[in-house]
Amino acid sequence: MERENILNSDQNICLHVDSESFAGAIIPPIYGNSLFTFNSYEDYVLGETNQQNKCVYWRGTNPTVEIAEKKLAALERGDTCKCFASGMAAITAAIFNSVKSGDHVLSVGNIYQSTDELLNYLQKFGVEHSTVFSVHIDDIRNAIRPNTSLIYIECPTDMNLQLVPLKKLASLAKDNGIRTIVDNTWATPLFQKPLIYGIDIVVHSASKYLGGHSDLVGGAIITSTEIMKTLFKKEYLLFGSSMGPYEASLLLRGLQTLPIRMKALQDSTMKIAQFLDKHPAIKRVHYPGLGQKQFSNETKHQLTGFSSLLTFELKNADHNTVKSVINKVKVFKIGVSWGGLESLIITPNLGHNEEELKKKNINPHIIRLSIGMEPSEDLINDLRNALGQ
Ligand SMILES: *Cc1c(COP(=O)(O)O)cnc(C)c1O
């Protein structure tokens, strides 16, 4: 019993595979075959009619990918998982599964820009999209329309990193017959498990912490058996954006060190957030790890840890100040994406979109950091030099 408990801990889910299934191989083999053959016509028919659980063709099910899927489902405490070619592929499948023509999608606070664009693109198919720029449950309730079929959120929200009360959101949605999707990429399943609060679908970009080494683009959906039943047959098999076995092997390797990476990244990021929080050139730091002032009672226990993506707003700044800070850092590299071993700096301010950012409640003089594995003192010194005294 005790051993069972230990083996079911998140750390062990990340680390181990059932090597008995693979002749004792400590690392599971990469099944590089596109198709699987059958001993008889009867077996073939069984496979064809149950592609979710039987290996027939790579686009549906692959044993290497399946190992990663089982781990992610276990980490999120969900029934089932499918892995995709990218986070956007997973998000697209989850959204298409949740809407039809005439429906309305509500997003809460800021979400990943491509997801926002995807939801606006759905207008072409008669699906409306609106955003409520508040994480308070009463404001969310007021933004629901009679035809709202989906509430889509990131928790914490994009850029301003606000926490949405997941339990209240899930029950509000259930009361109104509305599906909920949470993008859990920031927290990873180690630090937040949205499904336990009644959220319907969790999506991930595996390109960030889950892969963890900036050498993989992938995504995942974790949900109930019931939702996955149609999602697999339609959005998974028909859109054809499944993860391949080579990517799955990188994902499995990344997952092995996920707990230890997240702990190291959290410790380092906390120090950097505290340094920035006290810096005179900075108006505000957005990082849930900075403490109680950023939490409501409803969200206090949602996160059991904090990852390494944070943002800060410059005081008395203009576009040139933002530009100069980014050009002055030497240890941080300038680049998109995040969640790898290298520290990155970026801003959504492209010089010509300040008004657009303000409409999304984003301070145009905001800078985003993804903290990596360099010594935190080096990163702090780098920021100190770039920010000036
Ligand atoms: C990167 C990212 C995505 C998109 O994932 P890709 O793997 O790049 O397609 C979605 N959501 C969040 C929060 C992300 O950071």
Image: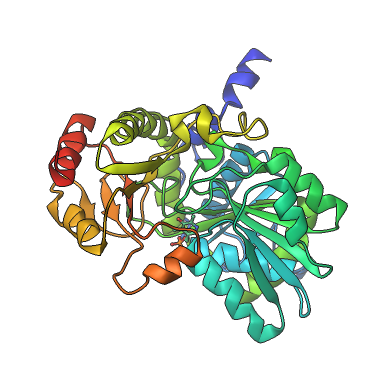
Residue 56 in sight from this viewpoint: no
Residue for point 58% across, 24% down: 7
Determine whether, in the image, residue 230 is placed left or right of residue 32.
Answer: right
Residue for point 62% across, 40% down: 76
Residue 273 in sight from this viewpoint: yes
Residue for point 67% across, 38% down: 77
**Quadrant location of the C terminus?**
top left
- Splitting the image into 4 quarters, where does residue 304 fall? top right
Residue at the far top: name it. Answer: 2
**Quadrant location of the N terminus?**
top right
Coloration mode: rainbow
Residue for point 36% across, 62% down: 348
Determine whether, in the image, residue 122 is placed left or right of residue 215.
Answer: right
- How far from the left and from the top, in percent, is residue 10? 55, 30
Residues 231 and 389: in front is 389
- Residue 68, above or below 299: below
Q: How many discs appear?
A: 0
Residues 146 and 249: in front is 146
Residues 18 and 294: in front is 294
- How far from the left and from the top, in percent, is residue 224? 75, 50
Residues 254 and 109: in front is 109
- Splitting the image into 4 quarters, where does residue 59 fall? bottom right
Residue at the far front: name it. Answer: 316
